[in-house]
Amino acid sequence: MSAIVTTKNLSKWFGEVIAVNNMSVEIHPGVTGLLGPNGSGKSTFLKMLLGLCVPSRGEVTIFDQMPRNNREVLRRVGYCPETEDMFDALTGFEFIYWLNRQWGMERSVAKKRAFDACERVGMTERMHDRITHYSKGMRQRIKIGQALALPTDLLILDEPMSGLDPNGREEIFALLQSLGAEGLTVIVSSHILYEVERVTDEILMMHQGSLLAHGHVREIRALIDEHPHTIIIECANPRKWIARLTAVPGLIGLELTTTGLTVRTKDPDQCYQQLNDGIIEDGADITAFHCADDNLQAVFDYLVKR
């Protein structure tokens, strides 16, 4: 499948400050998480994709065309910015409707798509209230809604979970997953790694303007062979499992805990196999086990420190 977004040696600096440094990536249909701490260059990278910021070096293409001042390309892109600049005197529905009209939709189409967008982000009950009366989470939903209202092929969401309560986050997680399943290309920027981990395994990790890693999180995690995996095992008889796991290849250490034991290994697959075999042979002595550092936060922390 051809890439929707392609960058080659993309860089941007402001005076002596390097915001984005030599990024070459391809982004395909589905959901891609753009991850990194605040100040890592995520927003600058997205603005260059949108043509809002001129690269200092390198190039970016969307749908095989340069995006800057390219109306044909930009009409196919929906954007939810991190910053908020809304017309508080309007209702949420009116805000989306008039942006649809500005895009070029006929009145009837603009109304229908505004209603559908409000419904999709869970704002139908409050869509006719003025924005000035909205909570931060409601305002965020309307911002996402205006991006969804357009007939786009690429959706760029910069920190879309900001201000949402736990229920709102779960709803947006589900929405993003459904958009990816529909074949839309979605780029989700966040500095909170577990948020993106809930939505997709395809990630771009940035730090200080540079690309740390790009690809499937499991593939990236597998590349860190020298970084031991910590597996937490909850069981009634940990000493029995210590005896069983001692011979597992790649074992670094075993430690008893109040609920079971902790295993440190360079070969987690072998360890999981032993656990599975033991459960089948000896019954349900183990109540739970999981890899404590097999997540994006652990991967990011390791890549930054190495």
Image (cartoon, helix red, strand yellow):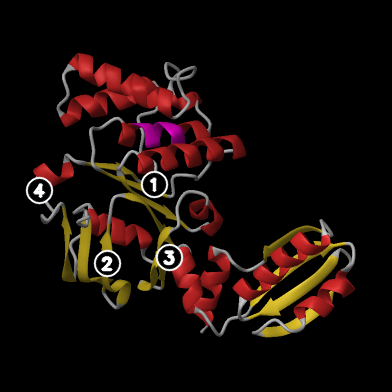
Judged from the image, the secondary structure of the residue bearing numbered disc 1 is loop
Q: Which percent across, then down, holds residue 177?
A: 43, 42
Q: Amino acid at mark 2?
A: Val
- Going from N to C along the chain, the mark reached first, 1 or 4, is 4
In this figure, which residue is indicated by the disc labeled 2? Answer: 25
What residue is shown at x 40% (from left), y 68% (from top)? 206
Foreground of the two, 233 or 114: 233
Q: Is residue 127 above or below residue 56?
A: above
| Residue 90 seen from this side | no
Q: Which residues are magenta?
A: 140-145
Judged from the image, the secondary structure of the residue bearing numbered disc 2 is strand
What residue is shown at x 52% (from left), y 50% (from top)? 198
Q: Amino acid at mark 3?
A: Gly
Q: How many marks?
A: 4
Q: Which percent across, then down, holds residue 290?
A: 68, 62
In this figure, which residue is indicated by the disc labeled 3? Answer: 39
Cα–Cα gap, marks 2 and 4: 21 Å
- Going from N to C along the chain, the mark reached first, 2 or 3, is 2
In this figure, which residue is indicated by the disc labeled 1? Answer: 83
What residue is shown at x 55% (from left), y 39% (from top)? 170
Image side of residue 225 versus residue 33, left or right: right
Q: Crowding at label 2, few (<14), some or many (≥20) Cα neighbours within 10 Å?
A: some
Cα–Cα gap, marks 4 and 3: 28 Å
Comparing labels 2 and 3, the label whose residue is closer to the camera: 2
Q: Amino acid at mark 4?
A: Asn
- Going from N to C along the chain, the mark reached first, 4 or 3, is 3
Comparing labels 2 and 4, the label whose residue is closer to the camera: 2
Q: Are marks 2 and 3 in contact (CB under 8 Å)?
A: no
